[in-house]
Amino acid sequence: MEKIKKTTPTQYDIMEDIKTRWSPRAFDDEPISESEVKLLLEAGRWASSSYNQQPWRVIYGLKGDAVYDRIMECLIPFNQDWAKNAQVLMVTAYKKTNKDGEEYFHALHDLGLFMGNVVIQANHTGIAAHQMGGIDQEKAHREFQFTDDYGIATAVAFGRYGGDVEKLPESLREQELETKRSRMDIEDFAFNGNFKSKS
Ligand SMILES: Cc1cc2nc3c(=O)[nH]c(=O)nc-3n(C[C@H](O)[C@H](O)[C@H](O)COP(=O)(O)O)c2cc1C
């Protein structure tokens, strides 16, 4: 099957793995092994974090195992409809308290750095990631027995690029096939001077 090619109109020339990453909802049927998952987590492990506190925690399931099904049960129905195409599902969580027992203000920031590494490493090996805020966080917290000082952030679906768009609900196909990606211009969010609000 022909892989969908997205156009990423960059203002400056950037690394291929940043440029070619995108978030599919259709994934190839080829399984992802546990060691492939560990490779992605290895990339995440080397992210920087405030005082090297590494607040990230992850639950992962491979298609066919019980953890995968338990994660699936925590997704909102909209995400369940397409995430069933994924070969690996993850729940991401973060530690809410820092080394002094106070609020860990940068925990979500640091989890984001972790995930940034994971998704770029994934892209480098031909694996696509689709992150989801649409997860019942309280349910996932209970289901995976997190303690009170941890919060659930997201779920993530992984699979190889090149999935069959026909496997998606019809309402999601057009967006999947849209080739042009878009972003705000740099000048609209970065200022060599005072903040300027456009919205
Ligand atoms: C924290 C976060 C939450 C997201 N939540 C969802 C979600 O619940 N469902 C979904 O289909 N996509 C979700 N997305 C995917 C975004 O819509 C997508 O990353 C964005 O449109 C940019 O597209 P790209 O990743 O292909 O560049 C989420 C992405 C992030 C980073």
Image (spheres, grey):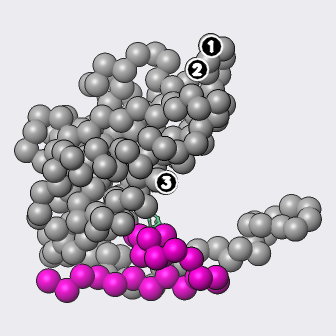
Give the percent coordinates (x, y) of residue 27.
21, 66
Residue density around tag 2, few if under 14, some if 14–19, many if 20 or more, within 10 Å: some
**C-alpha span from label 1 to label 3:** 26 Å
**C-alpha span from label 2 to label 3:** 22 Å
Q: Please give the label number shown on residue 101.
A: 1
The yes-or-no answer for disc 3 within 8 Å of ligand 1 is: no
Amino acid type of the residue that numbered disc 1 sits on in the rendered structure: Gly
Left or right position of 111 against 122: right
Ligand 1 sits in quadrant: bottom left
Q: Please give the label number shown on residue 116.
A: 3
Left or right position of 45 against 36: right
Magenta region: 1-22
Quarter of the image for residue 144 reads top left
Q: Please give the label number shown on residue 144.
A: none
Q: Please give the label number shown on residue 97.
A: 2
Residue 139 vs residue 2, the one in the foreground: 2
User: What residue sits 10% from the left and 39% below the top?
Assistant: 65
What is the count of numbered marks?
3
**Position above or below: 164 against 29:** below
Quarter of the image for residue 164 reads bottom left
**Position above or below: 93 against 114:** above
Under circle 3, the secondary element is helix
User: What residue sits 46% from the left and 16% below the top?
Assistant: 148
User: Going by the picture, which residue comes out furthest to the left?
Assistant: 64
Amino acid type of the residue that numbered disc 2 sits on in the rendered structure: Thr
Residue density around tag 3, few if under 14, some if 14–19, many if 20 or more, within 10 Å: some
Q: Quadrant of the C terminus?
A: bottom right
